Amino acid sequence: MLVEFIPLLMFAAVCVALMLGYPVAFTLAGVALLFAGVGIVTGYFDPSWLRTFPARLFGIMTNYTLVAVPLFVFMGVMLEKSRLAEALLENMTKACGRLPGGLGISVVVVGALLAASTGIVGATVVTMGLLSLPTMLKRGYSPAFATGTICATGTLGQIIPPSIALVLLGDVLSSAYQQAQLNQGIFNPRTISVGDLFVAAIVPGALLVIFYIAYVLLMARFRPQQVPTVIQDEQVPLWRVIPSLLPVLLLIALVLGSILLGIATPTEAAGVGALGASLLALWKRQLSWQRLTDVARSTTEVSAMIFAILIGASLFSLVFRGFGGEELVHQLFNQLPGGTFTAVLIVMAVIFILGFILDFIEITFVVVPIVGPVLLAMGVDPIWLGIMIAVNLQTSFLTPPFGFALFYLRGVAPAEVRTLDIYRGVMPFILLQVLLLCALALWPALATWLPDYL
C-alpha cells in the first residue's frame, strides 16, 4: 500500500529539500534519480522509463515556443537598463499631479506598462521600488500604501502579456492538453498556444489595473492623510506626456498586435520585441558596448536558470509517472466529493500554498504537468485554467509572510519602512486579486471570450 504513495513522497521530498535551500534544478533531478535508483533496486520502478529521457531533452532543445523565453528576457532587461521607467514615471507624475492620488495612479500605470514590457515580476518590483518609493514617501504617502501599491503593481508582470510565466504555462498546458485528449482516445487532438494565453490574459490584466486605480482613487477620497493630492511645481499637460509613452506603447503594440492579428507567432514577436527594445535604447542613447554586454550576460543567466529547472523538472515528472503518480492523482480527484469543482479548488489551494516556497517556474514545470492532464481530462477549459493559475500565483507572490514580491521590495526599501508596513499595504490588493479570481470562476468567459472571438 505504501508503494502507491511513493509519488507523493517524492513531491514532499522536493519541497523539504527546497525549503532547506538546495538549488531547484539539481534538487528536482537529484530527488528523481534517488527515488528511481531505490525503485530499480527494490523492483518497484521500470528502468525503461529513464531511457526516454534523452528524447525529452531533445524535445526541449528543439521546442520552437521556448525560444521566446530568452528573447522576452532580453527585451525586458534591455528596457530595464535604458532608464525608460524613470522618464515615464517622472512625466506621468507631472501630468497626474492635480488628480486625487495622482502619484499612486502614475505608479500603477507606469508599473503596468513596465510589466507589459518586461514580463518579469522581480525586475518590475525592484525597478519601481527604487524609482517611486522614495518619492511617494517624501510627498506624504503612508509607507503601507506606497509599498502595497508598488508590490501589487510589480506582480502585474505575471498576468499582463508578454509574460514569461504565460509563455512557460502555455507550453506546458499545450502538452498536457494533448496528453489528456490522447488518454481519452482522441487521436486528432485540439491544440492551444502561448498566443491563446496572451489573448486570454488581456481582459483579466486590464480589469486588475482598473481595480488598482479605483482603489487609489477611493483611498485618496476617504483617506487623504495616507494618499495626499500633491500639487506639482511643474505641471505638464497630458498631451505632453504622450511622446514619452509612445515608444513603449508602440513596442507593446508591435509585440502583442502581431500575435493578435496572426502575423507572427509568440517566438517571432519576441524577436521583434528584443530588436525593438535595442533600437529604443539606441535612440535614447543608452546603448553602449558595456551595457549590451551586461544585458547579454543577464539574459544568459536567467535563461540558463529557466532551462536547467525545465530539464530537472522533466526528469522529475518522468520518474513521477513511472511510479504511477498520474494514475494516483487521477484516482484521488475522481474520489473527491463535488467532482471537477472540488478538484480545481484543491489544485488552486495547493498552488497558492506552494507559491510561498516555489517560484512560478518550478510550479509551472513540476505541478502543472502532474495535475494538468487530469483536470483537462475532467473537462476543464485549458485557457481558463492557465489564466486562473497565473492570477493565483500572482496572488500567492503578494501574500505575507512568504510572498516573493515582498522580499524583492524589502531588499530595496529604505530602513525606516517596516516589514509590517509592507504586509499591511498589500492586504487590500490581495483582496482585489481574490475578487478577480472569484469573477473568473463565476464568469469563465472573462478569459475565454476574446480568444474564441479572435
Image (tube, grey):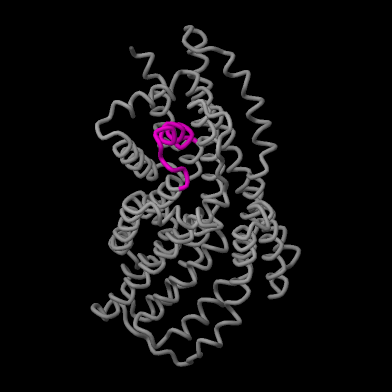
Q: Which residues are magenta?
A: 366-383
Give the quadrant of residue 277. Answer: bottom right
The residue drawn where x is 70% and y is 37% is 62
Image quarter (top left, top right, bottom left or bottom right) of the C terminus: bottom right
Give the quadrant of residue 358. Answer: top left
Residue 74 magenta: no
- Would you place residue 102 above or below residue 287 in this image? below
List x then y, in percent, for residue 202: 48, 60
Give the quadrant of residue 85. Answer: bottom right
List x then y, in percent, for residue 346: 31, 38
List x then y, in percent, for residue 386: 46, 46
- Toward the right, the furthest residue is 289
- Would you place residue 282 above or below residue 411 in this image? below
- Would you place residue 48 above or below residue 123 in this image? above
Question: Foreground residue, 296 or 154?
Answer: 154
List x then y, in percent, for residue 78: 65, 62
Q: How many marks?
A: 0
Residue 377 magenta: yes
Image quarter (top left, top right, bottom left or bottom right) of the N terminus: top left
Question: Foreground residue, 87 or 324?
Answer: 324
The residue drawn where x is 44% and y is 19% is 324
The residue drawn where x is 53% and y is 30% is 179
Question: Foreground residue, 91 or 410?
Answer: 91
Q: Main secondary structure of the magenta part?
A: helix
